[in-house]
Image: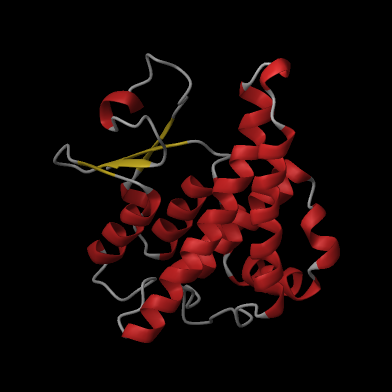
Amino acid sequence: MKLFFSPTSPFSRKVRIVAALLGLDGGIELVRTDTGNPQDAIRVKNPLGKIPTIERDDGVCVYDSAVIVAFLDDLAGGGKVIPAEREARFAALTLEALADGIADASILQIYEKRMRAESEFSASWVAYQHEKVERALAALEADPPPSVAASAQGAPRVNVGEIALASALGYLDLRFEGAWRANHPRLVAWFASFVAAVPAYDATKV
């Protein structure tokens, strides 16, 4: 299989961490992708021109990151990073949606500054996206996920929501100099436990 990705994308990182935890990363070729290049193959593989996109061995392409994770979990036998039990499953998927929303809103802030001419820049749009991130971080600080413990038996038991959250927080560290850390000590502690327990996090660092 081929994974079309960017090393700085939190969504790509989420998929790469999942693949590593499921033991599938050895069978996936990483293809660095430039979504801004009209000649890049991503626009053929995914009409939206978005990453990550995975191309299966039979040529069928799967996207976006949430669908890729579901595909990989199923490929590994199911119930691995997406819990099989109903309440746990929807809790994990809801956390994934919240974390992906943090990543989305953060990327939009970067794109507003990077892609628009100065005369078109909208400070109110950036503030709107920033407020989304702040509300999400406040909610997570009030009720963070349980600390992640390392496992002597192999990969730690983490779910897709936790993986997505770690990927989003890593993006905030990368693009916003970790400013989120000052006011979210409980979330910082959770993040540290995840990084310590999941070697795939550091292995996918830019």
* Residue in view at x 61 percent, y 72 percent: 197
Say which quadrant the C terminus sits in.
top right
Quadrant hosting residue 84: bottom left
* Residue in view at x 78 percent, y 52 percent: 178
* Residue in view at x 65 percent, y 80 percent: 143
Judged left or right of residue 85, residue 195 is: right
**Foreground residue, 177 or 119?**
119
Quadrant hosting residue 186: bottom right
- In the picture shown, does residue 101 fall above or below 34? below
* Residue in view at x 48 percent, y 57 percent: 17
> Percent from the top left, x then y, of residue 162?
53, 69
Coloring scheme of the render? Answer: secondary structure
Quadrant hosting residue 127: top right
Give the residue furthest to the front.
124
Say which quadrant the N terminus sits in.
top left
**Foreground residue, 140 or 160?**
140
- In the picture shown, does residue 55 fall above or below 15? above
> Percent from the top left, x then y, of residue 190?
68, 74
Label total for image = 0
Judged left or right of residue 173, residue 93 is: left
- In the picture shown, does residue 38 fall above or below 106? above
Is residue 39 at least partly visible in the picture?
yes
**Foreground residue, 185 or 73?**
185
